Image (cartoon, rainbow, N blue to C red):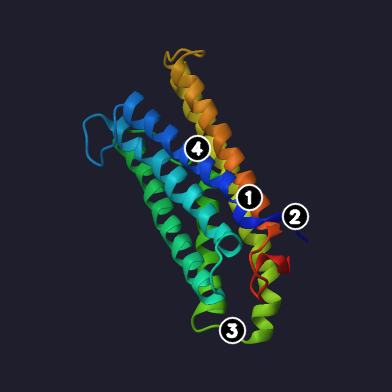
Amino acid sequence: MGIEVKSWELAFVPHALAIAGALMVLVWCIYLRGGLAWESSNKSLIFNIHPVLMLIGFIILGGEAIMSYKSLPLRKEVKKVVHLVLHAIALILGIIGIYAAFKYHNESSIANLYSLHSWLGIGIIVLYGIQWIYGFVVFFYPGGAAGLRRESLPWHVVVGLFVYILAVANAAIGFLEKLTFLESSGLAKYGAEAYLVNFTAIVTILYGASVILTVFSKAPQDDDFSYSAI
């Protein structure tokens, strides 16, 4: 199954949305929320690391990893390495981003894991890690038998897309949750910051949707390990 649009043409859309989303979350956390810090008496600066790393590091880089098989006109072996490395970086930055949220909660005497956003976040990062390890072992090193790889590929793709869709949805929930907290603390509901957070969430959703569309677009060349196997 595929969309009769060349993937490298369609990929311009998610790349533009990725730049927009990255700039918006940086403006929000650095300009409007005061900046980023790993150690600070202002604990909100510690929290600010969380949305920055989860959007830029996890959602955007994860999306680029997913699209790499379709949008890059490279040899299969090269695309496989790019796919693997980008997912590894996204996973590491996602773990750091989640740890930053725990660090903020612990140093601010706030309970952990009380919200749907946090529950989904832990589940998503665990599934993402399992998916990466399985992909590394079966498709990269030491590599499974040809039959195992052929049978595993459709499931690897479906589970990967499922986890990614969950991640995008949970990011939107996270923006909503944080904005609700800020508004309950006095932030203007129709102010510039509230609009920025809402539009950042919308851009995040649109980016995720465009990544999925790119997956089903026409690859620059057919190979045994393209998403066309779905």
Label drawn at residue 3? 2
Residue 226 seen anywhere in this rendered image of the structure: yes
Which mark is in front, 4 or 2? 2
Disc 2 is placed on an element classified as strand
Check disc 4 and report the residue beneath it: 114
* Mark closer to the observer (3, 2): 2
Of the residues shown, which amino acid type is indicated by label 4? Answer: Tyr
How much space separates mark 4 and mark 3, taking CA atoms?
A: 40 Å
**Residue at 62% across / 52% down in the picture?**
9
Q: CA distance from mark 3 to mark 2?
A: 30 Å
Indicate the position of residue 46 as horizontal and vertical percent values. 30, 37
The C terminus lies in quadrant: bottom right
**Quadrant of the image for the N terminus?**
bottom right
Q: Amino acid at mark 2?
A: Ile
Quadrant assignment, res 88 = bottom left
Ranked by sequence position, the earlier of labels 4 and 1 is 1
Nearer the observer, 39 or 199: 199
Q: Earlier in the sequence, mark 2 or mark 1?
A: 2
Q: Which residue is mark 3?
A: 144
Identify the residue position indicated by label 1 in the image. 10
- Classify residue 102 as left or right of residue 188: left
Q: Residues within 10 Å of mark 3 (few under 14, many from 20)?
A: some
Q: Is residue 31 above or below residue 225?
A: above
Give the number of the mark in front: 4 or 3. Answer: 3
Residue 7, by quadrant, is bottom right
For badge 3, the amino acid type reads: Gly
The reply to whether callout 2 and callout 1 are in contact (CB within 8 Å) is: yes
The amino acid at mark 1 is Leu
Looking at the image, is 148 positioned above or below residue 13?
below
